[in-house]
Amino acid sequence: MTLEFADPEVHALIRDEGKRQFDTIRLIPSENYASAAVLEATGSVLTNKYSEGYANKRYYEGQEFIDPLELLTIERAKSLFGADHVNVQPYSGSPANLAVYSGLLQPGDTLMGMSLPHGGHLTHGWKVSVTGKLYRAVQYKVDETSHRLDFDEIRELALKERPKMIIAGATAYPRIVDFEAFASIAKEVGAYLHADIAHISGLVAGGAHPSPVPYADTVVSTTHKTLRGPRGGMILCKSEHAKTIDRAVFPGLQGGPHNHTTAALAVALKEASTSEFKAYAHQIVANARALAGRLIEQGFTLVTGGTDNHLILFDATSRGSTGRRLSRALNRAGIITNANTVPFDPRKPFDPSGVRIGTPAVTSRGMKEPEMGHIGNFISRVLEHEDDVDALDAIGREVADFCRQFPAPGIPNAA
Ligand SMILES: *Cc1c(COP(=O)(O)O)cnc(C)c1O
């Protein structure tokens, strides 16, 4: 029985979510549209199979098709990223980070990551995360005026705190991360270098951002952000850490791998190795630059003054709004973003100054620089009508008409 008849309630919610994704401008930089092929693999019979362990060392029988599938996925990831070793079993980005820390560190060891209000991720040692409780977390910030990473300051902090691991990577940083500079500091203080490319792995795969693989001991990525695969995580590492990392994932942290996700990741990695994907990755960056330019023309202040990746962080207070007020109004008009702190934000985290946006999803729909101009104009118009729900709804209808001109991967019948 199809879902529509088996469970009309759930079917309707999924259908409506598909329509929402089709009819709105999706600017959340961690979101994307996975292809129909990726979604098909995700929704397959592989969800039925248990396969604790690794290929040829499983704890259950019946692995005739699972072993070659996992090995194929690993081979594709190794070749796409040029990594010595890859583990494709982490359930998502957060458990992948935790696996790396638990493999290479002891509880109480010093872990140095980017502060969350400055662009780092919760799992980089922020105090409410288990990573901030298990380890002695020290946090670096961005420079007070440029809002960029300041390697003199990072080096000074590392020399003072002597971390056992330094994390390079962010969840809200609009500039290139200089992994080589991080590596030289890590080497000087005798720390492991861990790179978290959850957001930018699609850019790295497509050659639109430098790769950390030559410099880092370990690299973690989600598989569902710019990489445009299923929801999941993976760890790339140097051969010397291969055994430690594999043991940390299983049996250290997880049970059975999600084979349906592994299969979908294999499909996404195949897609990401094409010349079309390379063009896609570069277009994401070109689009972000175009959108940033339009927002600056509209009078917004951008953190660091611009972008060189997929992401833009702009200050809504530079035009008299707040992050929360503007992101709510944008949502009402069908433009989906999130409120975000800006570095040294004077406002409270729940109603911060900034709005975080990005171009991975709109670029997946084939939008290019001219459309980024339209999107910048929509954002500015929403701000001017923030308290007028009728005006916001009218903009929302224009937004839906605009979106319907662009097919959305994986959402065939939404038009
Ligand atoms: C999204 C993200 C993660 C966590 O990924 P989940 O799949 O949400 O657990 C980790 N690190 C960074 C930098 C991220 O942006």
Image (tube, grey):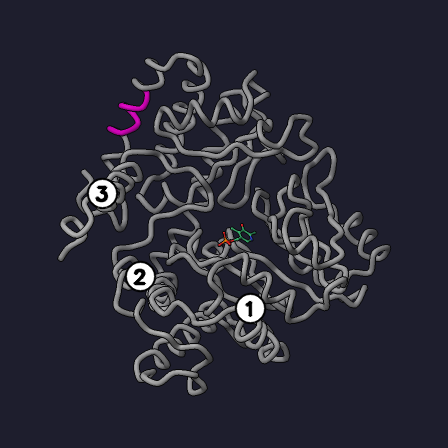
* Dot 1 beta carbon under 8 Å from ligand 1: no
| Earlier residue among tags 3 and 2 | 3
The residue that appears at 22% across and 43% down in the rendered structure is 9
- Say whether residue 397 is magenta: yes
The residue that appears at 39% across and 12% down in the rendered structure is 388
Of all residues, the one furthest to the right in this rendering is: 160
| Earlier residue among tags 2 and 1 | 2
Task: Name the chief secondary structure element in magenta.
Answer: helix
Q: Nearer the viewer, mark 2 or mark 1?
A: 1
Q: Nearer the viewer, residue 161 or 200?
A: 161
Q: Which span is picked out in magenta?
A: 395-401
Residue 391, picture quadrant: top left
Q: Nearer the viewer, mark 3 or mark 2?
A: 3
- Say whether residue 209 is magenta: no
The residue that appears at 32% across and 13% down in the rendered structure is 390
Residue 205, given in percent of the width and then of the height, sits at 46, 60
Residue, disc 1: 253
Residue, disc 2: 42
Bin the neighbour count of mark 1 within 10 Å (Cα to Cα): few under 14, some 14-19, many 20 and up: some
Vertically, is 278 above or below 117? Answer: below
* Dot 3 beta carbon under 8 Å from ligand 1: no
3D distance between C-alphas at marks 3 and 1:
35 Å
Q: Nearer the viewer, residue 300 or 95?
A: 95
3D distance between C-alphas at marks 2 and 1:
23 Å
Residue 136, picture quadrant: bottom right
Residue, disc 3: 9
- Label 1 near label 2: C-beta < 8 Å? no
